[in-house]
Image (cartoon, rainbow, N blue to C red):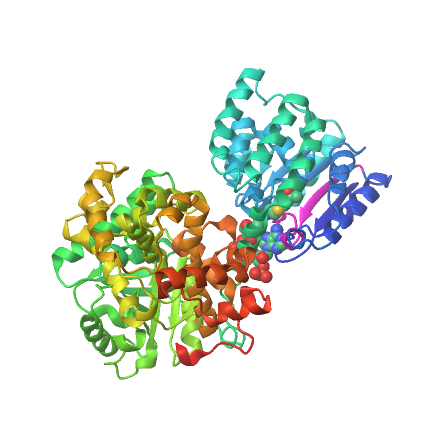
Amino acid sequence: MEIRDGVALISMSNPPVNALAIPVLEGIEAQVKAAQADSGVRAIVITGSRGKFSGGFDITQLKARTEGKPVRNMSDFNGVLNSIVEAGPKPTVAAIENLALGGGLEVAMACNARVATPKAQLGLPELQLGVIPGFGGTQRLPRLVGLPKALEMMLKSKPVKAEEALKLGLVDAIVPADQLIAKATQLAKDIADKRIPRKMASFDSAKLPADEAMAKKVFAGARRQAKRVKHLMPHPWLCLDAVETGVTKGSVAGLASEQDAFAKAVSSRACKGLVHFFFASRSTAAVPGVTDVGLKPRATKCVAVVGGGLMGSGIATACALSGVRVLLKEINQKFLDAGMARVRANLASNVKKGRMTSQKADAIYSLCTPCLTYDKFKEADMVIEAVIENLDLKQKIFADLERSCRSDCILSTNTSTIDITKVASKMRNPERILGAHFFSPAHVMQLFEIIRTDATPPQVLVDALGLSKQIKKTPVVVGNCTGFAVNRVFFPYTMSACLLVDLGLDPYAIDNAIRAFGMPMGPFRLGDLVGHDVGVHVGQNFIDDFPLRVYESKLIPGLMKSGRMGEKSGKGFYVYDAKRAATPDPEGIAALLHASRAAASGRFKRSTSGELLAMTADDIAEMIFFPVVNEACRCLAEGVVVRASDLDVASILGMGFPPFRGGVVHWADQVGAGRIAARLREWCTAYGGIYQPCPYLEDCAVQGRSLAEGPLRGPDRSKL
Ligand SMILES: C[C@H](O)CC(=O)SCCNC(=O)CCNC(=O)[C@H](O)C(C)(C)COP(=O)(O)OP(=O)(O)OC[C@H]1O[C@@H](n2cnc3c(N)ncnc32)[C@H](O)[C@@H]1OP(=O)(O)O
């Protein structure tokens, strides 16, 4: 604590984001108490060190709580905020630079005024972690910004920028960073000397709904949204309970309700899964033997994208959006114009959604240079090939690229299935090639699968990881195998769903069960979205490479033959209107189901009609996801990923696996290897090799080990 001209400056310090760990909370408590008691102090300014206010309560403490480890009850801190920060004898002002999130913003809201820098971001994103604000945020935010905005900020975990915070009344002034402490100090003195009134958010109800009916309407709307997933994710509902109690019964009752709701939320499975995902997604960029040997990423200033189709134009957009110059190459003017038009349309959609101005979109578009030849490719630091999945064509392109690019340029392919070493087989230096697998739409989807071969130099990997940081994607480094991590782990997903249909289940019931599990859509709706021609093409790789553990149904080939390609042809399992809304079409697909079931009859060892009738949505989800877990186990045993949690991140960001379940391996460990292996064994006997449990899963089941621990003797890379 530093005292200047009667104002005590207290700075929170816990790099990198000044997380409110228990010692930090204790430090705030001790220093504010000391300042309140010091006769030489007339006001207090609270700030954060090293250019950040605070990223909130220490999430490692939340993690410990979700794991049942003993941790100090932090509800005592509410007493500190209420009685000595907000209502102590001397006024307090928060000086906010950069981040004030979660508990960080709650400390700031307990202060009597707030000053922020122009780049500050303020929010209560606790719900993204499966908890609710626990330091009075559910009470003070609605009183500072009004109920509807407060609910939006909390339920969507969406921070506001300084300018909006000023308009909302969440901050009292915005000043440049170098004037922050001076302004906050002056404001603190003005309040102490009563030139400016002292405000206490907890007791200010001016912005709350004027009457009960109006409040009820707002809560009813918010609860409708939260109700659908209440059984899986209790925290939005619990958050609404705490806010509603405060609005209807006052902030003292509201605070008690918040404590109760926080305790319930933090002990939920959803919190465990979401906190696991938080840390898992931040650890993927660390690759042992690569990122810990002192190599520095070389900046990628120019990326050349070969192919301007949906993927290529999406990748070009993703790069340009982050200020990376792009060369977009196509084979003729018509395709090139179409590719550039797609980039423009991607940017226009951001303008339409209010994410950027049209001037900004024009500036980003101007970073993309259309090319019909490789003439400019010497400028490229990295090439990403994104043409159709044709091995001969890719091999020719890479031979051309080797001649046209600098020797230090990274050459990569966006193939989703083809073996990288086959693509490289006609190159003089095949070790130069790397997989750079984006997910469609590439400018929106967060995941970036980086595929290495045994020959990939560490510097090339470090550079690719550097690019992922530049373009704000989450990287997962994967070994070279059929389907890499995401497509490989999820190939049994659609195959098992088709098997269930061939057994007699209704595809729409399957889609509903999978949605109820928490996926954004079921396997058949997803197939319609991707296009069944693409699905069949990708699926063929697994049929060729893993013949003993696939299920070949006639269902999707039959669908294709009848012209039902999915959304793009207006019909697949569903029919689509002009706005792409899907409607089930049971009559339209009845003959196809019949034909597929007839072709499958006699393939199964067990008659199942009775069991099928008894199948619940949970049973369906298990029969679809247990073989997915099994394939994830094979990937772990083979060392396809660096750590099990990388598969969790890949499954969530690449396939939409529900984040509140923590990812495919984390979820499997909650279910238990023993149960999964036992069910798979049973189904394997009845329905075939797609359900054959792999040795790693069996070992974990027998030894009672968690799947996330990984193989005991290290990965067997010879099986890649
Ligand atoms: C009682 C209260 O109401 C409860 C709470 O406050 S719960 C916490 C609420 N706060 C949040 O949800 C914010 C979580 N953090 C974030 O969103 C982002 O980390 C951020 C916006 C603060 C910074 O983002 P960015 O600059 O991209 O850096 P990012 O890589 O995410 O984080 C940097 C490091 O800080 C850590 N970190 C970030 N916030 C943290 C927190 N609240 N607690 C502990 N560690 C945290 C990250 O794990 C990471 O650690 P690593 O370097 O060892 O991997």
The residue segment tinted magenta is 42-63
Residue 282 is at least partly visible in this image:
no
Quarter of the rendering containing residue 375: bottom left
Residue 485 location, x and y as percent? 40, 65
Q: Is residue 319 left or right of residue 533?
A: right
Q: Residue at x 22, y 36 (%)?
A: 577
Q: Give the answer, above or below, for where 428 lies relative to 368.
A: below
Where residue 371 appears, x then y in whole percent?
A: 19, 63
Q: Residue at x 53, y 65 (%)?
A: 707
x and y, in percent, of residue 566 in the image = 22, 47
Where is residue 580? Give x, y as percent: 25, 39
- Residue 334: within the magenta? no
Q: Is residue 60 magenta?
A: yes
Which image quarter: residue 466? bottom left
Residue drawn at point x = 23 percent, y = 75 percent: 404
Depth check: 440 or 491 in front?
491
Tell me if I can see residue 348 in this picture: yes
Q: Residue at x 55, y 52 (%)?
A: 273
**Residue 502 located left or right of residue 178:** left
Indicate whether 680 appears above or below 274: below
Compared across the picture, whether 351 is left or right of 98 comes to: left
Foreground residue among 373 and 185:
373
Residue situated in front as seen by the camera: 114 or 568: 568
Quadrant (top left, top right, bottom left, bottom right) of the C terminus? bottom left
